[in-house]
């Protein structure tokens, strides 16, 4: 099985994904880290210097360069859903899991949005980005995991694992 996590920045794709991948015996792939290696700088620095469009182009290239595998848990950046091409590519060989949470929880985790490497913050507020992206996340998701009911990281991890267990058939559709 291959799983791709999508969701707003600050929802926990990397933090929770890393632990879930380990528990499931999957290779963890952090797309933001791959982008940093490719551009040779922090995400925010690259966005400030080159702009949102250049960042999204690199992000799409990185996503499209991933080789289909049964062993991945991929943590995408929050803006991955702006690339229909990349999302359709990932959807062909992985199950797209949306980690969803309330705006208040997400905004409390993002202490300084202007330093986070968020595409679109020049023209929109964090709340506007949240609303805009939410419909895109729903467009691509196969499974939604609502994290609002979990106050502790361990509870969220167990909730994700239970949800994945309950959706074994859906996850199995990408097995070779």
Image (cartoon, rainbow, N blue to C red):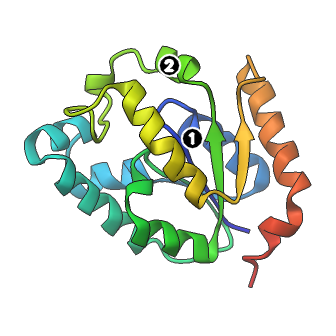
Give x and y (percent) for residue 7: 54, 43
Give x and y (percent) for residue 17: 63, 44
**Above or below, 20 relative to 89:** above
Query: Which residue is outermost to the bottom?
Result: 176
Query: Which residue is outermost to the right?
Result: 166
The residue under label 1 is 13
The residue under label 2 is 109
Q: Which mark is residue 158?
A: none
**Quadrant occupied by the C terminus:** bottom right
Give x and y (percent) for residue 35: 32, 54
**Quadrant occupied by the N terminus:** bottom right
Q: Which one is nearer the viewer's eye here, 133 or 52? A: 133
Q: Secondary structure at mark 2?
A: helix
Residue located 41% across and 72% down the image = 85
Disc with the residue nearer the chain's start (2 vs 1): 1
**Above or below, 94 relative to 49:** below
Residue located 45% across and 33% down the image = 130
Question: How would you rate the neighbour count of disc 1 (Cα within 10 Å): few for under 14, some for 14-19, many for 20 or more?
Answer: many
Residues under labels 2 and 1: Cα distance? Answer: 12 Å
**Above or below, 81 relative to 112:** below
Quadrant position of residue 120 = top left
């Amino acid at each position: 099985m291959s799983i791709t996590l999508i969701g707003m920045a600050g929802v926990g794709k990397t933090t929770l994904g890393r632990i879930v991948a380990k528990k499931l015996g999957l290779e963890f792939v952090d797309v933001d880290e791959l982008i940093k290696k490719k551009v040779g700088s922090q995400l925010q620095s690259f966005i400030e210097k080159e702009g949102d469009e250049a960042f999204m182009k690199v992000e799409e290239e990185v996503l499209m360069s991933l080789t289909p595998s049964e062993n991945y848990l991929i943590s995408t950046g929050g803006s991955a859903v702006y690339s229909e091409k990349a999302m359709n590519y990932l959807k062909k060989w992985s199950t797209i899991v949306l980690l969803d949470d309330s705006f208040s929880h997400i905004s409390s985790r993002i202490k300084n949005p202007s330093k986070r490497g968020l595409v679109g913050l020049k023209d929109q507020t964090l709340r506007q980005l949240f609303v805009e992206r939410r419909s895109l996340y729903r467009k691509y998701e196969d499974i939604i995991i609502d994290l609002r009911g979990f106050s502790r990281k361990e509870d969220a991890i167990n909730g994700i694992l239970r949800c994945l267990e309950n959706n074994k058939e859906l996850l199995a559709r990408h097995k070779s």
